[in-house]
Amino acid sequence: MPTPRRCEVELIVPFHDVDAMQVVWHGHYLKYFEIARGLLFDRAGIDLYKYHAETGFLFPVTRTQVKHIHPLRYRDRFICTAWVSELRRKIVVDFEIRLVEGNTLCARGRTEQVAIRSRDFKLELSVPEYIRKAFEGDDGQ
């Protein structure tokens, strides 16, 4: 399989994402993953809303994982990297969050999405070819 697409986004921990100890609440890591995953789809040329309108396919997230390794704190600058690791039966996106300063690994994660038809919520047993081809393309990313 060709090298999967990947992307990075640099973010800064905002005040509203931290608790009284200035540590990021665990649920916000999924938000950071979503930002990177959205950018990953954008760079692949995939607009899931438009694709749904044209084909009737939806791609709900069916599983999420986060391994917390080092805490993010208020005003930390970090890079969230996302890459596609599977495209056969489901879309699997893996993630890493690293501090900009020192490259410390803070978290690893994964999301899984399946294809369903919105008219009857029938599960498709493979990722549509259009989606696979968009992610398998090589544009130097």
Image: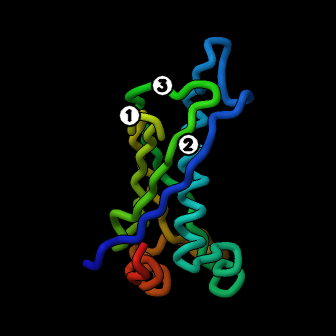
Q: Residue at x 34, y 63 (%)?
A: 85
Q: Residue at x 45, y 53 (%)?
A: 81
Q: Amino acid at mark 2?
A: Leu
For label 3, the crowd category at 10 Å Cα-Cα, with few meaning under 14, some 14 to 19 and many 20 or more, is some
Q: Nearer the viewer, residue 89 or 12?
A: 12
Q: Which badge, 1 or 3, is on the more N-terminal residue? A: 3
Residue 71: which disc?
A: 3
Q: Amino acid at mark 1?
A: Thr
Q: How is the image coloured?
A: rainbow
Q: Which badge, 1 or 2, is on the more N-terminal residue? A: 2
Q: Nearer the viewer, residue 116 or 28?
A: 28
Q: Is 30 situated above or below 137?
A: above
Residue tagged 1: 104
Q: Residue at x 71, y 81 (%)?
A: 53
Mark 2 to mark 3: distance in Å? 14 Å
Q: Secondary structure at mark 1?
A: loop
- Tell me which corner region of the image, top left, top right, bottom left or bottom right, holds residue 105: top left
Residue 55 drawn at (x, y percent): 63, 85
Residue 59 drawn at (x, y percent): 56, 66
Q: Secondary structure at mark 3?
A: loop
Q: Amino acid at mark 3?
A: Pro
Of badges 1 and 3, nearer the viewer stands 1
Q: Split into 4 quadrants, where in the image is the N terminus?
A: bottom left
Residue 113 drawn at (x, y percent): 48, 61
Residue tagged 2: 30
Compared across the picture, whether 30 is left or right of 95 comes to right
